[in-house]
């Protein structure tokens, strides 16, 4: 019997992981600069957390969650996104009581959604995200968007478009909800069964439908921005002002709605405009979620965040032809001829690695010519050959692979020589 990875998952092979590590290191460094500290939450949580936090009218909750019952009869779900878990931790550990607010968190890890596999979209995918919880200042909205843009630009992406919208406050949403029901109700039978169910529960979700997105009524649907209260309109204006201060270009799309129920006020997506990227252009999405902390059992504390798929980030790099500057080369390859030389090689490898010098050797007793080819394939900067003569003289010729130059160096001075 042969085994393969489950549908919708992938193996990230050793030749691919340096790119992942590079991207993640850039994210972590920018989080350090912006002061978003890493949080690590469980891969599974109580199912009700996502039903309440993500929203029971969303595709995620209705169709895409991996839910199971444990041996104690408890319903658990593999996390489909990171915000609900981060907010749960914020509430459980009473971070709202800490003196320095807002609490700025970041996370990276696997998420799970049962959806149709597409380019850059998997059922197990790696998501990076940030949350700023505890401030209703429009400036923090702009900061969160700025961090997301900085990440994409720092890895080398140029074909980017930021799209923003305001989902308004409760009064705005109630007025808009009534307008949407009146707009769609006469022709709702022309829409998919999901949209028909959403009409009364959450008509805003109809605008996010992947099946009926080209229906004429979508284009003519009442825009949420037309129903903004004075306070909501002022908030959105200030977010835009701060984006302009930061020099971040944006496009306002009145039909932009995020696929999660907890968003209000600012919503945004960052898209790839590269021709080779594909039909689904969204790289990153986020927004403000005032009310979510309270829904999960905490105080009435505002928050904003975003999440991005690392798989789709790497796909965008490929579409733009951007090569990441990753260092995966080998400093020194040691070739040993004979058992005594092999013992010395093992000793030298240990001394090199202790000082941070990457080193390797042959472990399958290949001939010298085959070992030299291996050193070349591995991109070794230097090669050392140890035989009986070298053991007698306690010195070796260190060959620089790029130039072909060789220099004789005593065993005891090899570390210093390679460090220089």
Image (tube, rainbow, N blue to C red):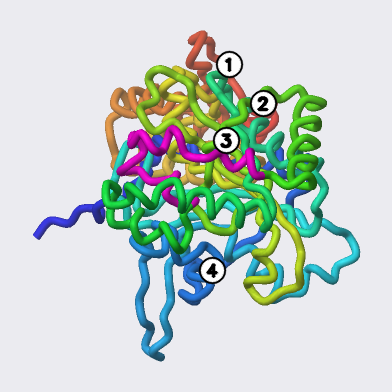
Residue at horizontal 46 percent and vertical 27 percent from the top: 316
Could you tell me if the residues under marks 3 and 1 are in contact, i.e. CB atoms within 8 Å? no
User: Marks 3/1: CA distance?
Assistant: 68 Å
Task: Classify the position of the C terminus by image quarter.
Answer: top right
User: Where residue 137 sits in the image (x, y, percent)?
Assistant: 82, 48
Residue 349 visible somewhere in the drawing: no
Nearer mark to the viewer, of 4 and 3: 3
Helix, strand or loop at disc 2?
helix
Residue position marked by numbered label 4 in the rendering: 42
User: Marks 2/3: CA distance?
Assistant: 63 Å
**Foreground pick, 364 / 205:** 205
User: Marks 4/2: CA distance?
Assistant: 46 Å
Could you tell me if the residues under marks 1 and 2 are in contact, i.e. CB atoms within 8 Å? yes
Q: Which label's residue is closer to the chain start, 4 or 3?
A: 4
Residue at horizontal 48 percent and vertical 45 percent from the top: 346
Residue 222 visible somewhere in the drawing: yes
Nearer mark to the viewer, of 4 and 1: 4
Nearer mark to the viewer, of 1 and 2: 2
User: Where residue 307 sits in the image (x, y, percent)?
Assistant: 57, 47
Residue position marked by numbered label 2 in the rendering: 417
Helix, strand or loop at disc 4?
loop
**Foreground pick, 142 / 370:** 142
User: Marks 4/3: CA distance?
Assistant: 36 Å
């Amino acid at each position: 019997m042969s085994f393969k990875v489950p549908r919708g998952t992938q193996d990230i092979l050793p030749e691919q992981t340096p790119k992942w590590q590079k991207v993640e290191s850039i994210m972590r460094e920018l989080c350090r600069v912006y002061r978003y500290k890493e949080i690590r939450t469980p891969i599974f949580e109580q199912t009700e957390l996502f039903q309440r936090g993500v929203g029971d009218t969303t595709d995620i909750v209705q169709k895409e969650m991996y839910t199971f019952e444990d041996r104690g009869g408890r319903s658990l779900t593999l996390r489909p996104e990171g915000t609900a878990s981060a907010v749960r931790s914020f509430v459980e550990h009473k971070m709202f009581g800490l003196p320095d607010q807002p609490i700025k968190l970041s996370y990276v890890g696997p998420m799970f959604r049962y959806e149709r596999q597409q380019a850059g979209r998997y059922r197990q995918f790696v998501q990076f995200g940030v949350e700023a919880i505890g401030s209703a200042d429009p400036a923090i909205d702009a900061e969160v968007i700025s961090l997301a843009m900085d990440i994409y630009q720092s890895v080398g992406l140029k074909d980017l478009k930021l799209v923003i919208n305001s989902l308004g406050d409760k009064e705005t949403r109630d007025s808009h909800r009534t307008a949407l029901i009146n707009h769609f109700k006469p022709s709702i039978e022309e829409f998919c069964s999901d949209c028909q169910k959403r009409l009364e529960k959450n008509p805003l979700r109809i605008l996010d439908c992947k099946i009926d997105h080209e229906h004429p009524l979508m284009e003519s649907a009442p825009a949420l921005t037309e129903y903004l209260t004075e306070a909501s309109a002022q908030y959105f204006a200030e977010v835009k002002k701060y984006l302009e201060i930061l020099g971040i270009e944006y496009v306002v799309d009145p039909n932009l709605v995020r696929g999660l129920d907890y968003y209000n006020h600012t919503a945004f997506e960052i898209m790839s405009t590269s021709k080779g990227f594909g039909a689904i252009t969204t790289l990153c999405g986020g927004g403000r979620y005032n009310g979510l902390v309270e829904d999960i059992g905490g105080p009435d504390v505002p928050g904003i965040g975003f999440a991005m798929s690392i798989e789709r980030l790497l796909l965008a790099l490929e579409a733009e032809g951007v090569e990441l500057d990753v260092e995966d080369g080998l400093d020194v390859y040691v070739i040993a001829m004979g058992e005594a030389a092999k013992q010395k090689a093992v000793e030298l490898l240990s001394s090199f690695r202790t000082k941070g010098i990457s080193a390797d050797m042959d472990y399958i007793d290949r001939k010298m010519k085959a070992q030299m080819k291996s050193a070349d394939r591995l991109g070794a900067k230097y090669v050392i050959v140890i035989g009986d003569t070298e053991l007698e003289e306690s010195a070796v010729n260190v060959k620089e692979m790029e130039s072909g130059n060789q220099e004789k160096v005593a065993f005891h001075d090899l570390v210093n020589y390679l460090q220089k």
